[in-house]
Structure formats: C-alpha cells, structure tokens
Image (spheres, rainbow, N blue to C red):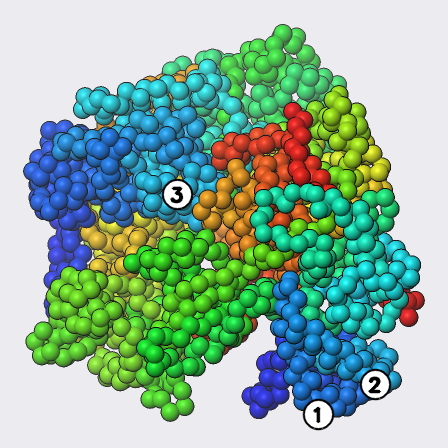
Amino acid sequence: MGKGRENQVEIMDEINIVRAVIEEGYQISPLAVELIKSSNSPDSLLKYVLSTVDDCVFVIEPEHIDLKGFEASRAVSEVASGSSSEIVSRMPSDSASSPALRPVDHEMARILNPLSNNLKETVLVSSVESEPASTLGVPDSNPETDSDILSSREPTLDFIANPVAKSVADPVPNSTNESGSSSFVTASTANSARGSLSSSVKSSLSSGGTERQASSFFGQAGSPSLSASNHVSRTNSLFSNPGNAFPSRPRNEGIRHLSGRNPVTVISDITGHSTCVGEYMQFVQYFRDRYSRLSEILRSRMNARPIESLKRRSFRRGSDGGNEELSIIGMVSDISSTNNGHKILSLEDPTGSFSVLIRNSDKELFELASRLLLDEVIGVTGSVTNDGNLMMATKILQPDVPNSVQRRTGSHGKAVLISDVHVGSSQFLEDAWLDFLDFLKGESDSEEMREVASQVRYLVVAGDLVDGIGIYPDQEMELDILDVYEQYRKAAEYFREVPEHIRVIISPGNHDAVRQAEPQPALPERICVDFPENVTFVGNPALVDLDGVRILIYHGRSIDDLVASVPGVSYQEPAGAVLEMLKRRHLAPTYGSRVSISPEKKDYFIIDPVPDIIHTGHVHTLGVQRYKNVLLVNSGTWQAQTEFQKRVNLMPVPARVPVVDLADFDVKILSFD
Amino acid sequence: MGETIASEEMHEYFDRLEARLKEAIEIANRARARGGDPKPVVEIPLAKDLADRVENLIGVQGVAAKIRELETKMSREEAALEIGRQVAEGMVGSFPTKKDAVEAAIRVSMATLTEGVVAAPIEGIDKVDLGKNDDGSQYIRIFYSGPIRSAGGTAQALSVLVGDYVRRGIGIDRYKPREEEVERYVEEILLYKRVASLQYTPSEDEIRLIVRNCPVCIDGDPTEEAEVEGHRDLERIGTNRVRGGMCLVLAEGLALKAPKVKKHVNKLKMDGWDWLETLIGGAKSGGSAEDEQKNKIKPKDKYIRDLIAGRPVFSHPSRPGGFRLRYGRSRNTSFASAGISPASMVLLDDFITNGTQLKVERPGKAAAMSAVDSIEGPTVRLFSGDLIRIDNIKEAYELRPQVEVIVDIGEILINYGDFLENNHPLMPSPYVFEWWRYDYEAACPEMIPEEELKNPSVTLALRLAGEYNVPLHPKFTYLWHDINRNEFEALRRFVVEKGIFLKGELDGEGILKLPLEVSVEENIKPVLEKLLVLHRVKEGEILIEEALPFILCLGLDNSLREKASMPDTDNMVEAAGVLSRFKVYPRAPSRIGARMGRPEKSDLRKMSPAAQVLFPINNAGGMTRNLVSASDYTSCMNAKIGEIEVELGLRECPACGKETYFWRCECGEFTNPKLSCPRCKIDVRGAETCPKCGRKPTSVANVKLDFRSIYKQAFENIGEREKMDLIKGVKRLMNGQMTPEPFEKGILRAKHDVYIFKDGTVRYDMSDIPLTHIRADELGITAAKLRELGYIEDIYGKSLERDDQVVCLKVQDLVISYDGGEYMLRTAKYVDDLLVKYYKVEPYYNAETIQDLVGALLIGLAPHTSAGVLGRLIGFTKASVGYAHPFFHASKRRNCDGDEDCIMLLMDGILNFSRSYLPDKRGGKMDAPLVLTTRIDPKEVDKEAHNIDVPARYPLEFYRATEEIKNPTEIESIMDLISSRLGTPEQYEHFMFTHDTSDIAAGPLNSSYKTLGSMIEKMEAQLSLASRIRAVDAPDVAERVLKSHFLPDLIGNLRSFSRQRMRCIKCGEKFRRPPLTGACPKCGGNVVLTVHEGAVRKYLEISKEIGERYGVSSYTRQRIELLDYDICSLFENHKVKQLGLSDFMSGSAR
C-alpha cells in the first residue's frame, strides 16, 4: 500500500478486492489479485470467484479463478437478466426466516425453480465445477439454512447414508420450496442427507403423534389445531428459512449424524469450522452476519428502511400535521440516558447509524428499553424529529419467538441434562456423582428411580466437565487433581460407567481444555480418545437433534452479562437469563464484556431455528422455565461452594438433575445429595 | 507562624533563600503584568508553614491563624480534629449550608493531618452529603475517590473520625446501615482487592463489624470498571461499580489503622467506637510479629510473590549467600534507602545502580539503593576455582567475565531508623568491625592505629584474642553457622589428613594447602565456599592465605594435629569457639532477600503525547500535533489556509467588547468567558444558570480559528524567524474555560527543545535518594563555590578549604543528575528568552553552562501532592537520581524507597504556572504547585523523617539489643535520632553517619534493565544471573516469572483480543465493537484492531522454552500448553488444517 500516489486508483481497487476476499473469510495471493484486476469486469469476476471457490481453499490463487466458467455464467446471467435478477436479489430478504410461510415465497420459488434449472444445465456444460445458483451472485444473507444442510458437500465421517428410497416419498406435505431445493442437489449425499432428516421426522411423527394430542402444552394458550399445523410449524422451524431454496453457498458445516437406537444429529457446531485468523474484517463480518440474520427475522414483521435513507429525507410535517411513522432495524451500539431521564439508543445498520429517543413517560416502552442490551438487534418504529436527527420511538420489536411456533412433536424416552461437573476440583462432590452414576446404571435404591433410569436415552453435559487448570489465579490451591489430562482421564473413567445404550453428548465450557473464545470447538482428540464409544463431543454452542427433539446446548458464559445488565435477572433463577437470550434470539448479545468471542464467518450464537430445549449451565444454579413452547433448563453443578462463590454470595445448587421427558417435555428434578 | 529554631548560620541560609525568592517573584510579577497569562501576578502562593498551606489549599479563610493557635496547645492530630469541629460549627469560616460546613471541616482537618501537602483533601473527597436513615434521621455520607490513596492510611482513618466528630457537634445522627448494604461492602472490598490491590485486606467479619458500627457512611464514586455481582441496585448506593476510595478508607484506613484511631477516640472521649477494641483484638491473634518476638526471624517470601520478567531476584528469602545485613548509615542512605558495595552492583550484572528500587524481604517492603564502598562486596568463585571477595569496583569490572558463581552477594547497609520506622524487630547483627571495636576498647589498653584495627594481621588478631580475650576479629571469623556438624567434621578431618600448612616468613602469614581434586570430589571445597574461606587455586592445590585462625577454629594446631576433640553441639559457631578457645561470634546471622523493583529514573517529563504549548489544534497538526503544519492546514480544497476547527472558550473584553479566545484582549484588558446556554443558545451574562432552561452555561464552542494569523503574529511579536519544523500543541484543551496559553511560549519552548506538563511548567523527574553530607569534588563544583553558597565548615568543624572535605548538606539544597542539569539549562535559556522577547524585561538566569545554574532556585514537587517545596541547586551527579536532604524529600511526603518526583526551575514555575490551565476533572489538581513551601521545618515534614538516626557510631547496647531481637522502640532513647533533636537548632545541623563512601555516584551509570532491549533479552539476563547466584533458585525464578508475569499476560491478551475495541487510524476514534459499515463513521478512515495476534503470542514461545529449560512444574507447563492450544485454535483456520483430508475426500467423491 505504500506505493506512489500516481497509482491511487489502482491501489484502491486492490484494497477493495483484498477486503472483499477477507470479508468472505479467504485470503488472496497478489497474483490472483492481478488476474482479477486485469479482467474487464473485475467486480463480477470477484463475485463469481468468491461464490464458486471451493470451501477447502484458504488462499485464493490464480488457479482458483475459473475464467471460462465466469464467461459462461455471464452469458447466462445476461439471458436471465432483468426481472429475474431483480427477484433473485430480493430473494434472501424476502425469504426471511419467518416461520410462517408466506405465499409470496412459494410463488417465487416456483418462478425461480425452472429458471435455475435451466441455468444449471447451461453452466454445467461449460464448467463442471461452478455452482449454478452461485453464479447469479446471490448475496449470502442466510448462510445457515436447511438447504445448506442438505447440499453440504463437507465430507463428514460420521455420516451414514440412508436408503435413497426414503427421499422419494416426502413425508412432509406443503413443502414446495423444499422439493424445489432438492432439485438443485446433484450429489447423492444430499439426497441421503435429506432422507435421514425426513426419516427422523417420520419416526418421531409415528411415535409421538398420539401422545402429542394428549399432552399438555405447558400452559401455552392459543395452540390451535394440532396435527396439520404441527406439521407445518415443525417443518418451518426445522427448515427455518423455508423460502430460501437456493443452496446459496455450499460452505456451511456438514451435519453429523450418528445412527443407532438413540440417534444424534449435530446440526450446528463450530468444531472443525473455525475460520478466525484474527483480522479486523472478520470482526466486521461476524457482526454483519448477526445483523443480517436477526434483521431478517424482524423484517418479516415490520417494514423497515435502511438507516441511511432517514438522513437523506427531509422530514417536514406532513399535510395532516403529524409526523410520518417509520421503522428501522438496527444493532444497538450505545445506550445512554439524558438529563431528564429519557433513554437514547444508538442504532446501527450496515448503512449508518441513528439515535432513537425513548421517553420515560411511555412507561411500557421505557421499561422494555431499560432491558435492552448492547449489540442486540431490534426494530424500532417511530417518527423522526424535524431536524432529522432523532427518532422518537413508539414501538420496539425484538426478534423473539413468534407466537405461531408451536410445540413440536416429541420423541420418546428421557434426556438427562447436567453441567459443571468440575472433576478435579477439591469441591467436586464425588459421592453425589457416584450416586448419580448408579442411578444411570439402574442401581438406585428406589424403584421409582430405577424406572426413570430405564427410560434414559440421552445424557447431555453443557460444559465444565473438569475444573481445568489456570482458569483463575491460584487455582492449584483448590484442585485435587493438578494434571488437566488426569482430570479428563478421571472423567472418562466415570463416563465408562454410564450404560452403553445411553448416548452422552459433551459440550465444553470455560473450564475445559479448549480455547476460551466462543464458539468453542469440541474437546481435542487427545482427550476424547479416553471416552467410551457412546460419548459424542460437540462444540459450544451446539444445536443437536436427539431423535427428533432439537436441543441447543450452550455453556452460558453470557449469563454473567445478562445478570449484570438486565433488571430482574439473577443467578438464583438462571433460566430467566436464558429467556432473555431467547427473546433476542441470541445466546450472547453483548460484545466485549464477559464473553470472549472468536469472530467467525457465521454468528453461531444466533438462535435460529428455534429449538425445543435450550440447555445451559455455568452459574451452578438450577432453573427450569418454559417460554412459547421452548423448554429452558439451566442445570446445576457437582461442585460445592467455592471460595469465589462464597465471596460473591452465590449458593450453588449441586447434585440436582433435571430429567426431560422427550415425549411431553415434562421435567423432573432428581436429587443426589 | 511558629519561629524557626535554628542556628544563626541556618537562619542566614533561610533568609538568603527567601530573599532570592522574593526577588524572583518581583521579576515574575513585572513580567506577567505585560503578558497574556491568565493573571497578571504570580499564581503560586507562598506558604511559610503548615497552617499557611492548609489555608491556601482548602481556601477557608482564618484557618491558618486558628491552626497556629491550636498547635501551641495540642498535638498535630488533636489540633486537626479540633479545627475540624470549629469549622463545622461555624466558628471558623462561613458556609451557606450545614453540608458545606461539614464538607469543609473534613477537608481542613484532613489537610492538617497530611501537613497540607497532598492533594487528598481536595481531590480525595468528592463531596459530603446527607443521607436518610430508615428511622427518618439524617446521617453523613463522605464520598471518597481514588486520590484519597495519597493521604495515607492514618489520615484516611482519621478523616472518618473527623466526620463523626463534627456530626455530633451539629446534631446529625449516626449511619444505620441496612443488612444488604453491609454485605455489599463485603463483596465490594474483596472485589476491589482483586481488580486493584490492597495493602491489607480485612476479613469479611472485620468488614461487617466496621460497616455496622461506623457512625459515618463511607461512600464513594465508582473508580473501577468492575461491577459487583450480588448486592446490586441498592437504593442508597448509587452505583454497582466498585468504589475504590471507599475500599481504601475502610481497608487500609479504618481496618489497618484501628489502633491509631482508638488512641484518638480515647483522648477525645468519644463514645460509639468501642467496636475498635474488637477489631484490634481480632487482628492480633494471627500475627507473625509474635514469632519474631520469640527470638525467631522467619524467612518472608512476600517480596518475590509477584515476579516480573526482566527484574532479577538477587536472593531468595533469608538464604545463605544473600545480602548480609550490616547496620549503619552512610551519607547517602537511610529513609528507606539502603547501601550496597558498588562491586556488588557490577557483579550483579549492573542491574542495580544508584536509585534502583529493590523489593526487599525486610525491614520495609522496598528500598532504593546507594553505593557505599566501605562495606563488603560479593564473594565469587572464578572459573579458575579461586574464591575471592571483590570490594573494589575496578576489580569487579576486570573480573566479571571470569566469575563462575556468586557465592555471596555482599553486605547491605541498613540503618536502625528503618527498622524503627517499620516497627520491625531488630535482627541479630553480624559480628562486624564496629561491634568488635567496642569489645576491643573494653578489653585492650593498647593504642593501635585505626587502619591496623580495621585490617589486622593474623598475628595482631590472634594476639588480641589470646592476650586480652578480645573476640576473634571479624576478618578471621567465618560463617560457621552456614555449615552443619557433618560438614564441619569432614572439613576438619580433611585438613588433618590432606592439608599442608606452610608457615610464612613472618609469624602467622602461613598458607594452608589442600589438594584441589580430592577436595572437590569429597565436597570439601563447597564447604570452604559456604564458610567464605577465601582461597586461590594454583597447580592443583587450594591455597588458603592467613590460614592460622581458620586452622585454630577447626581445633587443630599449626602442625594440623587435632588438639581438642569435637564438642557436643550442633551450633558450629559455638564449636569453633570451643575448639579455638577464642570468643567467636556469628559472622552473618541475618540475610536479607531482595529482588529488583523498578529501575532508577532521571528523565524529562513529557505528557503523552508530548506537548510544548497548551494550544489546541484538534487533528489539524496530524498525529504529532504539529502547530507548524497546522498553520498550513487546509480542511478542503478551497478552504482558507491555516483555518482550523477547534473547541475553544469564547471570551469577551469588558473594556472594548471585543470577542477573543485569549486571556487578555489586544487592548490590554483581561477578558471574561462569554457564557451562553448550550441548548437555548442564548447569552447568559454572569448568571449561574440559564434563565430559560436552568442549564449550566458554557463558553465553549467549536470555532473556526484563523490559526495562521495567530501563528504569524506570535512569531512577529517575539522577533523569531519562522523556521521551525515542529512545535507540539495539544489536541484539545483540558481546562474548564478552554482558553489556550499564549502561542509565543510554544515557539520559544520548541526553540529550546523543552516540553511542558499539563500546568504549563517544564519538569524533570528523578528518583529520590537521601543525602546528608557532600564533598565539592563529587558534585562537580569547588570548595570556593560551596563557601559562596554559605557552607563554612566541614563536619569536624574545620574551615572549608579543600574540595574533598565532607560538609553537612543544608536542608533545601539539591544535587541533580548531569542530564537534569542540561535540561534545566535549556529551560533557563528558554525562560530568559521568554523574559526578554515575550515579556520584554531583562533576563534572569544568563546561564551559558550548567555551572552557571549552581545556586539557582528550584521547586520540588511530588506526584499526588499539591505543594511545591523551594530548593536550591548546588551540584551535579553522574548517577541518574536526584539527591536531597531527607527532610526535603519528607516535606514532599516522599520517602526514598524508589519513589520519584520532579523539579522545575523556580522562574519557570512562577512565570508559567496557572491554576486556570489545570484539567477540569478529578485528579486535575494533583501534581501541581498550588502552594509553595519556602522553608522546611523538620516538625512539619512527614514524621517518617524523624526516625532517621544521625550518630557517627551506634552504641554497643544497640548491638547487644539486636542479639536479643528486641523491638527497636526499646532502645529508641539511646539512639541519636532526629526526633530527639526536634525543637533545637541541632535539628538542622551536625548530623553524622556511621559508614562513609568515597563516591556517592559509584556504580554503573544505568541499570541493565534500562539498557537491555526487549523483554526477552531482559528475561534471559535475569535467568542467567539467577543461575549464577548461590542464593537464588533459578527454576523457582523461572516458574514465578511464568506464573506472575507471562501467563497472566498471555491470558489477559488472549481475553482482550476476543473482547477488543477497534480504532480508526485516521482520527483515532475508538469503537467498542466494529462499525457494521466497516469504516469509521466519523471520518471514513480505516478501522483497525487494537489487539493483534502478535501481542497475544508475544510471550508464548519464550514461555514454552523457559518452561522446558528450567524444568518448571508440570502444572505450569500444562498451562502453557493449553494456552498454546488456545491461541492456535483461535488464530488458525481450522479448515486449512483439514485440507489434506478433505482434498482426498472430495476427490474420491467426484
């Protein structure tokens, strides 16, 4: 960049190219930059390259730039230009993750399908490697979609292909979009992937169908007719972006599926997919992804305009004397109070930022505003003052869980949720823990317990399996096992006692031997090898499907932030903090406080799709709540009160175990002290 | 004021200083009357005594007179409480409300307690408020803030007592805390301990006890970012963040100083403080002091708990081979500074030099080092096998490359007063010459010359011991206590079997020969080394010279035959005594562990970024804030050249009505701020608040300033040519009125390359070192010059004629480093230029060389204080420190344990300082000369200085007392202390010292810590030194450095990477998180990270390597391993790692 001034224009180009590439999580060699620059339309070429380049590539070299394919795609896009390109460009936004299917989406999908098919053929002729949809340069605003899952080309070792036959009979009606998308998928893996999913849907349907009718709905009023709508909502929330039929970029992680009596499908997990190399643009991209995905959810419920457009308008009073109401969607970048006690929010979108005033006279709104967190994404409706500098809010909208999401079909059996075992700590309650293991083995004294134990299919550990080392100063004073690997070997020993048929899922926490920055990948191989076959390691957070029940596992570091900033949220009722996460559809909204983040291409903290259960830990207290058909569980701990907890006056709740009935989501708390 | 009690000579000295001060102020007043300063007169009020300072600092009229009156009747502390009561009750001063009176009362009282020097009374108490108890009664809340720290524990604690004392007088109830509030205090103080640090952390129950019973509510502003996790949003506590001031007052004040508070409570007969009894009773139970009372000194490892990379450990706690304690005082030690041989400095790889702070095991926490060459240097083993002691610095430099191991790092000279000040039991004194001399004098009637006594021959030593039963001379006393019985016996046997004793020509000069190879094999040589029996190695033999006393102590005769059998004792000192039939005393019973604290300092003060004039230019001058380029600045293509947009206060001339931004109008009248309401934009003439909306009006506005013409005009005014490259301004003014300094000052400062501090003065910082006696020849001046300055006779009462005569330093005379002298010379030239060219009066200094500055008046000023002290420059030193009389340091409330403070030229201070420049924020008034103390009264300096001992020799009783590990207070009466001289003319004069030094500045010029480059280099040097010193456990050092420095650094940086702020490289704007647009929303510039991978990884490799090399604990090595894994996981693209596998997979799939 230190070249002479005469090259200014060129240099700018170079920078733009490099920046665009970095934004997408790649790096680029100078030769490749030259090549792109030398093209007669570097812009579109760059787009093309970025959309077609293979996932495994890290540094884009000239050989990754497929000029022929590009030429061909240009020819095609010229044919398809005009109306279709407009539609395509609007696609992602319109296909917002609104759980309710909107007719327009179907329409669009239908319009687009043939077109895309044509495209595919054309392109395939000229270039085998290019992806049809990508050639159109669809902006990737919804990277994590069902279609992505389906079309994933990531070779996943655990993948077990299901009979292709299953995919023929699509059990889910009313899913035009889905069939549309599947028509794109060329590889057989995709079919089998879908097959596996559909089959799980099917099985859960058959097993839970009748129970579902009978079961109560946790006091959720207004759950209308069941069977059909359940189908729909289930489909919707699983394939949370129903309209987005395009496999926009085949870059998302593959799902891992473990079949067997108690199958597990890992739907979303950072493990093996971390792309952070510590550059500024990655941070930008991380927040842009958050904004775009959360704003899509809101966009389906409000008609918002870009923030920049507010500044350009003149806001003279309309003829009717009142100010026009407008809406914007933005990420909260600052919250302050005026001298008169009003609140001022600074909202930001990728076009600019704007200040929003919340008057303290509007009690309800003010109350809501005082619970807002930095960096959450909200929609605001209001009128802009005459000078065009401030919006007076009348309504604030959080992404939240739509009321239309209804309880999903359950499965059968039980899942045991625990966290914060802290093996190795001198405060680890080994006796209680051994009692718990006995329970799992079906060796409890009470008949009732043995009965429960016999139904257990899953054991989920939400982080802090061991106490770790060096987590806080002078930790060695409070450790029984000073060697961290020894701690894990001890833990493995315990888990070998868990009956083989119980599928164990272990996600790491801040005490575990993985990176502290979240999302955290699963525990390293070196540690995993000591554990028995029935243990599956996932990252933190991780979205996992347990034979038809989707559970979002998150250790819960952000609960500390929420307790500190949201009035009424306390360590005593940790599920309240999880509820706040759910309202924001984000596990750790505030950046720069207690949660360390790794800026990934995708914001793994976003809660989308809405799971059936959110399972957290970290704060060592027990809490169970339900919110709009989502079960929120913060499991307690197996560690007695530590010195630190004594100081902050926190009473842990050790040796209590929530057991969730996978059929009706009923929760029982078992006690082992 | 109280009359100064001093000799005629001292009176003359003070009068002379004051006369010159007056003269200088007259010149400055004349000058300022012509310039554009905020006021036409000097703005530093003079204070002759404490009472003056208090009144000037707090600004309550009549306080000074009252304090003087009270001081005649009662002690300082009582007077402080009494004056507080009188202010609160309105007997002194007048206040609009009760609250204001209480507030002023507490401030005045506290200022009196702190000698009116520190800023704590003005900056440390934010406000005093009244709260409401649940029963409806009122209570006092004192809001402490961070700077309260500078008041010290006692004053902090007493300020609470004052609060209670005054509230009673005016009928306000006590504070009745709610239970939740009590618990909040507990959590908050323990949290503060973690995020900041506390000298003393009270137990939870102690905190509860204090809060429940303290009659005044100790409150405070939030000072830390940290928030409490439980006990949030309490009604009567305004913040969830940690209130640092409150924590300090409660923990380091009330809890730690409870006995002192109790004393005053008893004296004043106040009720409601009985709970202090419980606090004092509870605190005592644990105490390690008790053990030490029982004749036991235990090693203390506190000083090495937090090791920092690059700052070496010189000795582990109380370990043989570490510093050997020697009692005494040299003219450049005492007052928390200690002396070591310059040879030790050199052999410890130059890490220590004059002024370097050492964290020591005892008696205090830290001490600054001074070179004292009359004490013993280190004993080393050379690669040749020789064991030699090196006392001489030249020899030290010569032999340094040959040193294999430093067996003993030498003596450390600590004076009795430091033990007294720290209330540390006296550790057993080694048997040293000073002590031996008493024993010799008592027993031997012979007159033997001093030199011979100090360094006796074997013959003399044995004759004295034999004939007069004088104990064996220290020169021939070995460290018998450092070996055990087995070693003793093995050595004895070995000497009998293998030794050959060659009697010399002269009687007693015999040499003992031992075969080298065998003695190494049989571990005899290490025993000799432990004993510090010096020897040389030649042709396969160990040669011990002057060996007869050693042979006798082994119980052998001069034919190396056993003449006595081994006594039945495990005490080897006793054994040596019994075997030799001499009195043998322990040679090194007390060892002092030490590590490096911080390096010495001698450097000009620069703000960061540095500035030469308080003139705001926003971003117009680029990142260097260059006013020269600001004069050519254009904001856009067709903007006016040199027009810059800055925040300035609008001012108005009351005479001609002209608007301006300067303190003085062109017509000569002083201007007033032109206030307007920031919201309603209306002029608010003189009103306190806006008549329309009630807001506080301001004069500050963003203005377009035609800087170019100001620039040109200024050059013209002072007749300088516009050929400067760089004049550094500031981005934004910090003072409340936002009015800049006259720009001319900046031009002249840039011309002479001097920089200013926030108040417009030029300063030079130096480490404080005490000095009580000087010689002209070591200060770069002559005896004649000293006579000129009022020095008449040397310490022996002889007329001062030669350059090498030692004279007693006068209390306000200073010796500064040569570098400081050069900077002061530049400053003097700048001041002269300023006087001539800007103020158009005659020059003052007329200095061409630094010699011309000898005799110039200076102002000494310490951080956290607000009172300068008048000083006089009398000489220069090559050491990087500032030498001054301990009283001078004490009058700034500094001791010499490694603190540093600054000097400025008097004329610079009085010409350029203005209160109006001081930042309008908390702490802004600290470190500014708000008053100037003109005369040092030893009674009014920090009491610590009263504990300095000044005799020429410690009495024998002292050495006896150390044997019994007595408390130093028990023998206070027999030691010649300052405190016993107070109130007599002797308080200023006729001080002595026990150990002389030939050169106060001997030793390396700068600590290696400063000369070594990167942290890694320093760390390598630290570890290499550690492995060479016998008293240091190198693997332990490595482990501690990893644990307390590198690992926290790695963890901290890793964490801050993942939570980092972003920064715009163009305008410097900071962002909590990246803007979604990616670019800076303010200026469109590129935004970058503030923490990069490099910063995170910085210490990773070295940590891994050191962990391996020194075999640190596996726990620590695992921590490093996990961090390595964490860092890789964060900064490596996992997908790249999978490349091989996925390539293969995707290939086969297609």
Residue B961 visible to the viewer: yes
Q: Which element type, helix, strand or loop, lies under badge 2?
A: helix
> Hey, which quadrant is residue A320 in on the image?
bottom left
Query: Can you tell which of label 2 and label 1 is closer to the viewer?
Result: 2
The correct choice, above or below, for B262 with respect to B831 in the image is above
- CA distance for labels 2 and 1: 22 Å
Same chain for labels 1 and 3? Say yes or no.
no
Which residue is denoted by mark 2 in the rendering?
Answer: A122
Q: Amino acid at mark 3?
A: Asp
Q: Which element type, helix, strand or loop, lies under badge 3?
A: loop
Which residue is denoted by mark 1 in the rendering?
Answer: A40
Residue drawn at (68%, 12%), measured in percent from left and top? B562
Q: Amino acid at mark 1?
A: Asn
> Mark 2, chain letter?
A
Residue B273, horizontal then vertical, whole percent: 26, 23
Which residue is denoted by mark 3 in the rendering?
Answer: B233
The correct choice, above or below, for B11 with respect to B85 in the image is below
The correct choice, above or below, for B647 with respect to A510 in the image is below
Residue drawn at (74%, 22%), measured in percent from left and top? A446
Residue A466, horizontal then vertical, whole percent: 69, 38
Q: Amino acid at mark 2?
A: Thr
- CA distance for labels 1 and 3: 63 Å
